[in-house]
Image: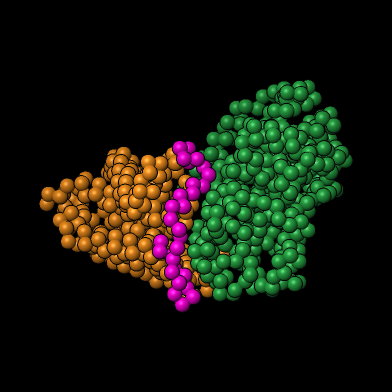
Chain colours: A orange, B green
Amino acid sequence: MFVQQVINGLTVGGVYALIALGYTMVYGILELINFAHGEIYMLGAYLGIIFLGFFTAIGLTSYSLPLALALTFVLSIVFCSAYGFTIEKTAYKPLRNASRLSPLISAIGVSIFLQNYVMLTQGATDKVFPHLFEETGFEMQGMTFTYIQIFIIVVSAVLMMLLNLFITKTRMGKAMRAVAQDKTMASLVGINIDTVISVTFVIGSGLAAVAGLMVAMYYGLVNYSIGYIAGIKAFTAAVLGGIGSIPGAMFGGILLGLVESLSSSYISPEYKDAYAFIILIIILFIKPSGLFGKAHEEKV
Amino acid sequence: MKKSFLLILLMSSVLIFSGCRKKEDVIKIGVVGPMTGDQAKMGTDFKNGVALAVEEWNTRGGVLNKKIVALIEDDQHDPKQAVSVANKLVNAGIAGVIGHFNSSCSIPASDVYNRAGIPMISPGSTNPQLTEKGHKGVFRVCGRDDQQGKVGAEFVINKLKLKKIAVIHDKTTYGQGLADEFKKFVEKDVEVVYYGGVIQGDKDFKTVLISIKEKKPELIYFGGIYPEAGLLVKQAKELGLSVPLMSGDGTIDPKFIEIAGAKAAEGTYLTFSPDAKKIPTAKKFVEDYEKKFGELGPYSIYAYDAANIMLSGIKEANSTEGRAITEKLHSVEFDGALGKIKFDAKGDVTVAPYIIWITKNGKFEEFWKP
């Protein structure tokens, strides 16, 4: 039972971590809590259902399911990245030199707008993800794992590794770290701040799109309000790990998933949502900057 | 985020109201249920059922020579919102209200209607508490969870003859109430190996299901609504936990099968009233409803009857005064699509038939009568 709960925890935790990365990257660079980020995740799930529906209609899913799924992933990422890019340009950029509260309120506004936009265009009822493939898995010593769980864990891990490589090895990654340390100084040495910020939003939104689509596939049920609680949980994960720190967000997300899974099986499932926040309070008491948050650590 | 949005809604609704309180020569009745959100299907069934009744009355010339207008409100299956829309309807000057759906909404809202002396008929709230509070103007056309839980328990004991079961609920007034009633009746003969709650709106029930699987029950009883029930059976199957699920009237909705997938939903037992399509008195209603709105929802007929009873009450009382209508609702026997309906002193129907349904080949079928 323990191993099975750990696998469940890793599945959920991987998703939290992917969303948390978006929060932490934006915070690292702009010191803004992007409350609209949870809605990008929700959009990812909806776009997945829409594109997959379209591919089913033109017969691509029956021709080659993996191809259809891959295209769905790519398109969802592209669309969500476009949403992220547009949101930054329209809702945050004009407020970049305003007081810190203004973009925060703007973010809440974007979140409310996106939720209602999806509710009005897609309907208020639950959308069911098409049952395209058998939810099969394999048994091992009395434990059952589904392939989709393994898929989520693997994809999350690979994406996190790629992101880490990108941040540490590429020119753009270096620029992002520089902007996170000191915006003015970075612009003085010739880094285009606007480009760096846009890239941050595009990457964060892309990761959220993958998370949304994987969750839609996993649970098979999506509605316009899923971004809210997922956003809050991922935000908790980011704070837990130390907001602004990328390894912190990854670790925080996975820790949160494991805590939820194990505590609800060994204590009681009734207060599942509460455990995450209890852990958060304890950690903030002991280490107010979060697990990986150091005063002078590189933030991005 | 959500709270601030609600606040804005509330504030704007106050403004809207203060602007439109002029006297009109119509009789208003309120229709409330979850019109949006994951349970919107139930709210829509209410709306359609009442709309059909109102339309029929209006073509016959209305009631007390006045046209009837149904005011539709959305409680979002949120108790706080339920109280706020109840106040809104009272201020709008309704003669009676058809609603709410969720017991957790009906119970607090009934206090508001009671204070205003406005009669309320719930088509779908089955928690015993609703009519146990002693509010004179509170009625329901459906049965009660203690009756429903008892039938479920009899089925498990006498027909399935099981020895070990698990009981879970969604911690709502309805879900936990039903699960507790069921547990109370079943405990005497069957061992309850697991009892616990899950969070309504959650999507991941694997942790609970794994704990349940360890205990090896022969059946899982779930007190709750279809979105969670659908995910429960789906995820149970994924975990290789192949015991049937049993649930109550909140789960009997085509969406349940859609969410779970026909394969996982197969063999789920549900307690519900007999098929509306097989009730002789409901024939005309079913035809008219399906012609107008398509597929009949599980609560459409209850909403239709509730509206008819309310309007008959107004007609009998020859007044839109709440206390006079309440008086008549208690004393008169109504001819509804469901058959003859009479309320007892508490406001419950005197006969509440519950039977066991089963999910078969992606459809619900009548299965067993106590």
Specify whether residue A168 is painted magenta. Answer: no
Q: Is residue A233 visible?
A: yes
Residue A122 lies in the magenta stretch: yes
Above/below status of B254 relative to A266: above
The image quadrant of residue A140 is bottom left
Placement of the C terminus of chain B among the 4 image quadrants:
bottom right
- Name the image quarter holding residue B190: bottom right
B202 lies above or below A7: above
Q: Is residue A42 left or right of residue B39?
A: left
Left or right: A271 as drawn, with respect to A188? right
Residue at (80, 41) in percent of width and height: B339
B341 to the left or right of A287: right
As rendered, which of A282 and B365 lies closer to the eye? Answer: B365
Q: Among all residues in the image, which is located at the extreme front?
A: A63
Residue shown at 25% from the left, 61% from the top: A162
Q: Residue at x 26, y 63 (%)?
A: A161
Q: How many marks?
A: 0
Residue toward you, B260 or A78 = B260
Residue A298 spot, x, y in % from top left: 23, 62
- Asked whether A177 or A156 is in front, the reply is A156
What percent of the width, then of the height, locates residue B160?
71, 66
Magenta stretch: give its range: A119-148
